[in-house]
Image: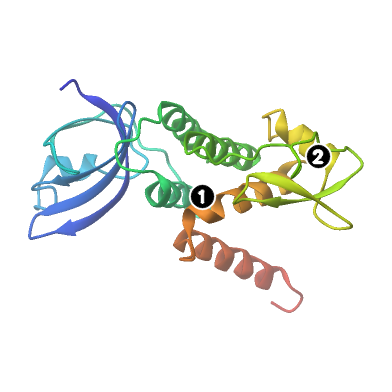
Amino acid sequence: MQPQPAFLLHKRPYRETSALVELITLDHGRVRAVARGVQRPGSRSRGRLQPFTPLHLTWSGHAELKRLGLMESRGAAALLAGEALLCGFYANELLTRTLPVELPVAEVFAFYGALLEALPYPQRRGPALRRLELALLEALDAAPIYVDERGAELDPQGRYGYRAEARHFVRLAEGGLDGRTLRLLAQGDWSEPGLAGPAKGLARAALAPLLGSRPLRSRELMQRLAASRRAAASPGA
C-alpha cells in the first residue's frame, strides 16, 4: 500500500517490546494496529510514534487489528502544554471513543490537523475544537438538525432544548437556547462572537449518546485544571 498520512491517537504497551496503537488516517479513518518493536530501547520508530506528530504509515493484514510497517515522520510534532495539551488529549480520546474502525472520515482528519495547528493559540482553540466536533458528528450522521419536533423552522424568538436521540429541538417555556442563536449555529460557523458557550454546550449534548455513560478522562483533567486555577486566583490563596 502507499504510505498513508496519519496521527497517533493512543498507544499502550503490548507484550515485551511492542505497542497497540489507535490511529486516525486520511483514507481509512481509525485504524487499530500492532507496532512491533517500538518499545525496544533504541528503536528509531519509538521516537516517531508519538501523539500530535504527523506521520506516514503503512500496515498489513485483513483483520481489524493490523500490523504496522513503514513509520516515517512528515513534520514536527505540535508543541502543546497546559490547557492546549489537555485539549489535544480530549480530541484524541473523543475520536478513539466514537469513530468506528476503518470508516473513511477525510474531513475529520483535515479538521484534526487544523486543530493541532490552532491549539497553541488560546483564541483559536475553542473554534477549532467545535469544528472538529461538528465534522465528527456529521461523519457519524449525528449532527443537530435545526428544526423543532414537528419539522418546522425554529422561531428566532423561541426557546429550545436539544433532543440528541431525535437530533431536533423542542420548544421550552424558559431556559435552553434562543432560536436566533440556533439559527446562527445552523450556518456552520460556530466561531461567531457570542456563540462559544452555546456551541460548546450543543456539541456536548450531541456527542453524549455516542460517548455513553463512561466519562472522558481528558474532560476530568480539564475540570481539575480549571478548579486549581480558580483556587489559585481566590483571595488568600
**Residue 18 on image: x %, y %:** 11, 52
Vertical relation: 27 (above or below) 226: above
Q: Which residue extends farthest top?
A: 2
Q: Which mark is residue 181?
A: 2
Amino acid type for the residue under numbered disc 1: Cys
Q: Which residue: 36% across, 30% down?
A: 104
First in sequence: mark 2 vs mark 1: 1
Q: Which residue: 8% across, 55% down?
A: 17
Locate residue 162 relative to residue 214 in the image: left or right.
right
**Residue 31 on image: x %, y %:** 26, 40
Q: Which mark is residue 87?
A: 1
**Residue 13 on image: x %, y %:** 18, 58
Amino acid type for the residue under numbered disc 2: Thr
Locate residue 11 relative to residue 147 in the image: left or right.
left
Helix, strand or loop at label 2? It is helix
Q: What is the crowding at mark 1: few (fewer than 14 residues within 10 Å), some, or many (at least 20)?
A: many
Q: In which image quadrant can residue 49 be found?
A: top left
| Quadrant including the C terminus | bottom right
Q: Viewer-nearest of labels 2 and 1?
A: 2
Q: What is the crowding at mark 2: few (fewer than 14 residues within 10 Å), some, or many (at least 20)?
A: some
